[in-house]
């Protein structure tokens, strides 16, 4: 599959270049959307065909609306195609009608982009419509504004639908809008973080990319539009400023963001927080840093093979792969990434665009208690996050792997399970897998966690009679793990380092070292190693496991260095050092 750079040229570095990049990316989407639902590619999504097509219709609006709000030209065809598709989608008498948004329905998600586009690009989306088309769009969007969202970041969606209606003179239920905004306040945490829903004491709401590309993104848009009261807008800006001080450490020097949590298939959206700062005119970090983080993130994605031959975005992460994304991902879903282009709404003389990008992102260890993480950027610029969150209480595909591993890396990515809970299919990189029969394995999915200085502490219970106290800390060149295990049963153990791409032909891993107490794998310019640290621990053997193809976010084929051992009932301590280096 081609990269954006292969189809569209080098990564854009100017505002005009960003505008051209946006139009190149959305052109296949708007063309396919305008051809109707039957032309929609088939993907294994939980949504119905109408909702899947409607994602393709609406999600380009996140970028196109910013493009129009910034006074940029050249998007006439894209707007014509989207208006044709959108007006058909909301026309009850048209065969492409997608139906009214219902409570907790996927269509409610897409109403937010329509509402925002009406608010900032009325001349593009509303003014060209006939009176009948306006009535149908008003009726459809009013249903969205009245629908009940899921109790998480979705609370913003009926608000944005209402803001769009308000912008074209349609009355809305202001008490309902206020109630949604008040509910969002309940999710606010320390340091500018939000929990994505109330969760439970055992499984608190997730803290992931829905904080930057959801809560903060929508809150700052509303504040910039003066669509909320001054005090609420002040809180949104203050929280975004606090959050920016932490979120900047999620990005590597090459622009890669830490892959963590769900909805990673939205790709470019990772950097949209830095772009929306320009729209809100909020220097949460200095403008050179904001521009650098957005620019490098877009540039990193520009080098990944994420496009189909016609230039449309594929489903996956760093390459096309529906197996690593959630059950709600379909062909139009990746266009949520167009949020990164919202900065086009800022004028070309805005400091976001005129600032000289920073030359370096310095090494730093950053404890982030609200996220239950300690992040470190090393001298090479790569970032590793030691993590203590739990898997979500609901069941996104690969939820344990996406939230409950010990470490997440910009350089190494991570794996998700592909089938049986076996060592080659379980996705046990950056995890301690335990088994009481040697065949079926369990890893951490929930537990209590906290930060002790620069050490992350986690307690978890894979069985009622097994308790594991894990301590994680960064050290020069890697991180150290210590597990104090109290077990009432005999346990087999397998502890994974980071995966690297598989090199060579055939099924046998190449460039590997396996010996007692150490496992190492080398691929391309990356070396992954795990080594026992304590001579008095139960002896563990070093092995390198060939992972199931298609299980990894970054590479189609990978190998995993790991340590294997056996524990008898009683108390034990396992210690190891894990390193991931560039050669």
Image (tube, rainbow, N blue to C red):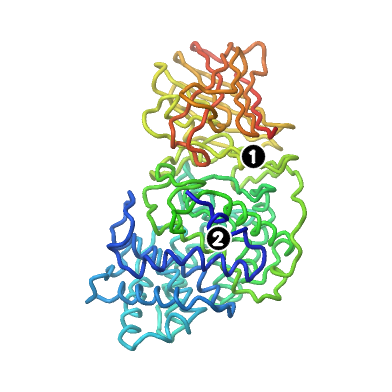
Indicate the position of residue 265 as horizontal and vertical percent values: 47, 51
Indicate the position of residue 187 as horizontal and vertical percent values: 52, 57
Along the polypeptide, which appears first: circle 2 or circle 1?
2
Residue beneath the point at 36% across and 67% down = 33
Q: Which residue is mark 1?
A: 384
Indicate the position of residue 196 as horizontal and vertical percent values: 49, 53
Residue 262 versus residue 193: which sits nearer the camera? 262
Q: Is residue 451 left or right of residue 83?
A: right
Helix, strand or loop for disc 2: helix
For the residues labelled 2 and 1, the Cα–Cα distance comes to 31 Å
Q: Is residue 44 left or right of residue 125?
A: left
Crowding near the residue tagged with mark 2, few <14, some 14–19, many ≥20 C-alpha atoms within 10 Å: some
Residue 515 position (above or below residue 134): above
Helix, strand or loop for disc 1: strand
Which image quarter is the C terminus in? top right
Q: Which labelled disc corresponds to residue 277? A: none
Indicate the position of residue 462 as horizontal and vertical percent values: 45, 27
How many numbered marks have been drawn onto this rendered protein structure?
2
Residue 509 position (above or below residue 31): above
State which quadrant residue 512 falls in. Answer: top right
State which quadrant residue 90 falls in. Answer: bottom left
Crowding near the residue tagged with mark 1, few <14, some 14–19, many ≥20 C-alpha atoms within 10 Å: many
Residue beneath the point at 67% across and 58% down = 242
Which of labels 2 and 1 is toward the front?
Answer: 2
Q: Is residue 332 left or right of residue 97?
A: right
Confirm whether residue 239 shows in the render.
no
Q: Which residue is mark 2?
A: 8
């Amino acid at each position: 599959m081609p990269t954006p750079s292969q189809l569209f040229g080098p990564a854009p570095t100017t505002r005009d270049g960003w505008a051209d990049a946006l139009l190149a990316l959305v052109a296949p989407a708007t063309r396919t959307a305008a051809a109707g639902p039957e032309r929609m590619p088939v993907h294994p999504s939980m949504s119905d065909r109408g909702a899947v097509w409607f994602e393709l219709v609406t999600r380009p609006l996140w970028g196109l609306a910013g493009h129009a709000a910034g006074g940029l030209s050249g998007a006439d065809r894209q707007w014509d195609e989207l208006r044709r598709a959108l007006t058909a989608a909301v026309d009850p008498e048209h065969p492409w009608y997608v139906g009214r948004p219902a409570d907790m329905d996927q269509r409610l998600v897409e109403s937010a982009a329509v509402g925002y586009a009406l608010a900032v690009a009325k001349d593009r989306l509303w003014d060209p419509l006939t009176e009948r088309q306006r009535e149908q769009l008003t009726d459809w969007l009013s249903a969205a504004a009245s629908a009940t969202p899921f109790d998480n970041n979705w609370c913003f969606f009926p608000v944005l639908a209402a803001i769009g209606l308000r912008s074209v003179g349609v009355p809305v239920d202001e008490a309902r809008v206020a109630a949604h905004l008040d509910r969002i306040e309940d999710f606010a945490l320390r340091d500018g973080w939000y929990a994505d829903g109330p969760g439970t004491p055992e499984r608190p709401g997730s803290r992931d990319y829905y904080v930057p590309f959801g809560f903060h993104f929508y809150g700052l848009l509303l504040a910039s539009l003066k669509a909320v009261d001054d005090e609420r807008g002040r809180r949104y800006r203050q929280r975004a400023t606090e959050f920016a001080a932490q979120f900047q450490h999620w990005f590597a020097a090459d622009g890669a963001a830490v892959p963590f949590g769900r909805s990673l298939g939205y790709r470019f959206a990772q950097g949209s927080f830095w772009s929306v700062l320009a729209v809100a005119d909020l220097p949460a970090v200095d403008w050179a840093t904001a521009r650098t983080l957005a620019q490098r993130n877009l540039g990193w994605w520009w080098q990944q093979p994420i496009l189909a031959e016609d230039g449309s975005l594929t489903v996956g992460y760093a390459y096309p792969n529906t197996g690593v994304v959630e059950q709600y991902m379909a062909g139009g879903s990746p266009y949520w990434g167009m949020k990164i282009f919202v900065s086009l709404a800022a004028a070309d003389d805005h400091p976001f665009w005129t600032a000289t990008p920073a030359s370096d992102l310095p090494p730093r260890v950053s404890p982030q208690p609200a996220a239950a993480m300690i992040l470190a950027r090393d001298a090479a610029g790569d970032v590793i996050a030691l993590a203590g969150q739990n898997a979500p209480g609901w069941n996104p595909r690969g939820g344990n792997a996406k939230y409950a591993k010990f470490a997440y890396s910009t350089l190494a990515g991570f794996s998700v399970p592909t089938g049986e809970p076996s060592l080659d299919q379980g996705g046990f990189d950056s995890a301690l897998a335990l088994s009481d029969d040697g065949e079926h394995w369990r890893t951490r999915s929930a537990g209590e966690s906290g930060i002790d200085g620069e050490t992350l502490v986690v307690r978890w219970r894979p069985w009622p009679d097994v308790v594991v106290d894990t301590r994680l800390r960064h050290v020069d060149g890697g991180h150290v793990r210590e597990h104090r295990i109290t077990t009432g049963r005999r346990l087999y153990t397998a502890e994974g380092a980071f995966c690297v791409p598989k090199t060579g032909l055939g099924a046998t891993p190449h460039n590997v070292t396996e010996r007692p107490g150490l496992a190492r794998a080398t691929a391309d310019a990356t070396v992954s190693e795990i080594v026992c640290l304590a001579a008095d621990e139960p002896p563990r053997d070093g092995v390198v496991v060939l992972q199931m193809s298609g299980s990894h976010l970054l590479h189609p084929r990978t190998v995993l260095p790991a340590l294997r051992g056996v524990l008898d009932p009683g108390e034990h301590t396992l210690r190891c050092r894990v390193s991931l280096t560039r050669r």
